[in-house]
Amino acid sequence: MKMMMFGRNKRAVQWSWGLVLAWFSASLLSQAAYIGKYGTPYDGTMLIESLGQWSWLLFIIEGMIWLIVGNLIYQKFQIVRKSKASTS
């Protein structure tokens, strides 16, 4: 079974890492702003309840981000494994 392959497309890999880093940074900054304002981190359950039906869209988007992260890590291991096999 093949995963999404960015393979030799360096630009797609760069965009994917950019997307992941932007998502992570936005999450970190929003949590920091909330802590700065209220003194405690926001509760995930509260966030989901406040979004109502839109929470499913958030779950789908976050799931896609995690799939991209997994794919990028998988590809990196494949590259390392192939380079070690070729040097042996």
Image (cartoon, grey):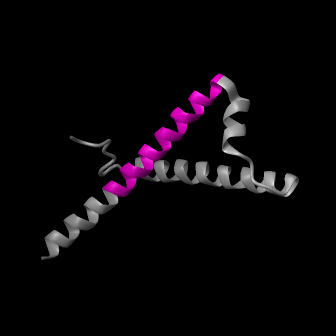
Toward the top, the furthest residue is 53
Name the side, left or right, on which 1 lies relative to 13. Answer: left
Q: Residue at x 66, y 34 (%)?
A: 48
Residue 31 to residue 60: above or below: below
Give coordinates of residue 65: x percent, y percent.
49, 44
Give coordinates of residue 25: x percent, y percent.
64, 54
Toward the right, the furthest residue is 37
Name the side, left or right, on which 39 lies relative to 63. Answer: right
Image quadrant occupied by the C terminus: bottom left
The one of 9 and 68 positioned closer to us in this rendering: 68
State which quadrant residue 59 falls in.
top right
Report whether residue 11 is seen: no
The one of 41 and 24 positioned closer to us in this rendering: 41
Give coordinates of residue 55: x percent, y percent.
62, 30
Q: Residue at x 37, y 57 (%)?
A: 73
Q: Which residues are magenta?
A: 53-74
Q: Residue at x 51, y 33 (%)?
A: 60
State which quadrant residue 1 falls in.
top left
Give coordinates of residue 76: x percent, y percent.
33, 60
Q: Main secondary structure of the magenta part?
A: helix
Name the side, left or right, on which 26 lies relative to 11. Answer: right
The one of 41 and 87 positioned closer to us in this rendering: 41
Report whether residue 61 is seen: yes
Q: Is residue 72 magenta?
A: yes
